[in-house]
Amino acid sequence: MSDLNDVGDRDGWRCWLCDEPVDPEASVNADRGPSVDSWGATKGKRPVASAERLAHRACNTRKGKVQPVVPWAPQL
């Protein structure tokens, strides 16, 4: 698993699920605190850095262990 600061820097400290800023100084236990969402990794294999994205802890928890469907805005 990648370092939280590395993932945050790469993702510009924005939650990939809600597209809101993530405070790098917030506690990782806070709802709006930073967490790393790992996706696409198979059981027993380490996730690769490209399969890790920054998310708020609450957004990541709400998503759960499923592939999310992030709806496109109607104007796109």
Image (cartoon, helix red, strand yellow):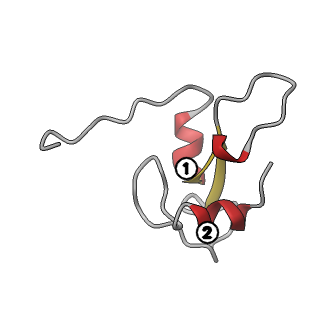
Secondary structure beneath dot 2 equals helix
How far across and down, in percent of the image, does residue 1 sit?
A: 80, 48
> Residue at left 74%, top 41%?
48
How far across and down, in percent of the image, does residue 56 sit?
A: 55, 55
In this rendering, the label closer to the viewer, 1 or 2: 2
Instruction: Look at label 1 and name its amino acid.
Output: Ala
> Residue at left 66%, top 59%?
7
| Nearest to the observer: residue 1 or residue 30 | 1
Residue 21 position (above or below residue 62): below
How far across and down, in percent of the image, does residue 76 sit?
A: 17, 42
For the residues bearing labels 1 and 2, Cβ distance under 8 angstroms: no
Residue 23 position (above or below residue 48): below
| Nearest to the observer: residue 17 or residue 49 | 49
Say the numbered circle drawn on residue 58. 1
Instruction: Look at label 2 and name its amino acid.
Output: Asp
Crowding at dot 2, Cα within 10 Å, few <14 / some 14-19 / many 20+, comes out as few
Residue that lies at the very extreme toward the right in this rendered image: 44
N-terminal of the two: label 1 or label 2? 2
Determine the image quadrant of residue 30: bottom right
Residue that lies at the very extreme toward the top in this rendered image: 43
**Is 19 left or right of 67, judged from the image as shown?**
left
**For mark 2, what is the residue?**
9
Determine the image quadrant of residue 60: top right
